[in-house]
Amino acid sequence: MKRLTGRTALVTGGARGIGAAVVRAFANEGALVMITDVLEEEGEALRKAVGEAARFHNLDVTSAVDWSDAVVETERAFGPVSVLVNNAGVVEFGSMEAMEPQTFRRVIDINLYGPWLGMRATAASMRRAGGGAVLNVSSTAGLMGYADIGAYVASKWGLRGLTKTAALELAASGIRVCSIHPGPIATPMTADIDPAIVADQPIPRFGTPEEVAAMALFLAADATYSTGSEFVIDGGATTGSMILAGTGD
Ligand code: NAD
C-alpha cells in the first residue's frame, strides 16, 4: 500500500517549481491530485505527464469564487479533499521606501490571503473526508527578516501565525495544519538570485523541489502527531552564525 492511497490532494501553484514536485511525489504515493495554478499551459502539461491520477484546474488563490469552483471540481473528480497544499506564492523586491503600495498588497494577497481563503474553502470538504492535513508553504522569511523583501517577509510570518490559529480551530475535525519553511530552493522563483547566497550555509547549495516535496509527503502521510508546527528545510541557513569561529584558537 502506498503512503497516500485513497487520499485526494489539492495543490496550489502546482504547475511548476516546488508545487509540481509535490504533485509528482503525491501521485507516486497513490494520491489523486488536483493541480491548480494560473499557469494553464504548464499545469496541463504536468497533468498529462502524471496521467489519470491528476487533473488541472485554473485557480487564482486570491479569488474566493475560484476556490469554491475548485473544491466542487475536485470533489466531482476525486471525492473530498484530504490534503491541501497552500504553495502558490510570489516574491517582489524593493526596500520599504521604494516598494509601491499596490505591490505590497499583491504579495500579501497571494501569499497570505490566498492560503486563508483556501483553508476556509476546503475545511468542510476535509470534514467530509474524515479529516486531513493542510501544509502551508511559508519560508525562512517566516522565521527571520530579510532586507528588501518586506512584503514577502510579512506574508510568510503571517502565514506561519495563521497556521497556528487554523491548527487550533480545525483540530477537533481531525485536520492537522503545519507550516513548511524552505530556504533557497532551485526553482523559477530563484533563477535570477546570486548563487553566492548559499555559500555560508552549513549545506552550501540550493535545495531541490524534490527535497521539499519529500518533507511535504512526510507531513501529509506520516506526521500524525504534528500540528501547528514549523518544519524547516533550509540547508541549515537559519542555524546561526560562524562569525566567531576560530576566535578562541
Ligand atoms: P515558482 O515561482 O516556481 O512557483 C510558484 C507558483 O505559484 C507558480 O506556478 C505560479 O504561477 C503560482 N502562482 C503565483 N501567483 C498565483 C496566484 N495568484 N494563484 C495561483 N497560483 C499562483 O516558485 P517556487 O519556488 O516553486 O515557490 C513555491 C512556494 O515556495 C512559494 O510560496 C514560495 O514563496 C515558497 N518558497 C520558495 C523558496 C525558494 O527558494 N524557491 C523558498 C522559500 C519558500
Image: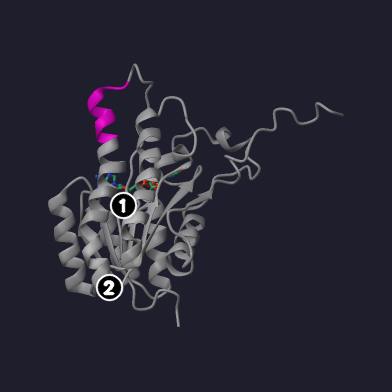
Which residue is rendered at x = 51% and y = 43% of the image? 183
**Residue at which label 2 appears:** 129
Residue at 16% across / 47% down in the picture? 63
User: Where on the picture, by quarter, is residue 29?
Assistant: bottom left
| Residue 147, horizontal then vertical, whole percent | 46, 25
Residue 208: x percent and y percent? 51, 52
Quadrant location of the N terminus? bottom left
Q: Quick check: marks 1 and 2 in contact, CB under 8 Å?
A: no
Please give the residue where the numbered disc 1 appears in the rendered image: 13
The kind of residue tagged 2 is Ala
Quadrant position of residue 205: top right
Judge whether residue 37 can be spotted in this image: no
- Mark 2 element type: loop
Examine the rendered structure and indicate whether residue 114 appears above or below residue 121.
Answer: above
Label located before the other in sequence (1 or 2): 1
Crowd class of label 2 (few under 14; some 14 to 19; many from 20; radius 10 Å): some
Q: Callout 1, which amino acid?
A: Gly
Tell which of 66 and 56 is nearer to you.
Answer: 66
The count of marks equals 2
Q: Over which residues does the magenta segment extend? A: 99-107
Q: Is mark 1 within 8 Å of ligand 1?
A: yes
Foreground: disc 1 or disc 2: 2
Residue 122 in the image, given as x and y percentages of width and height: 24, 61
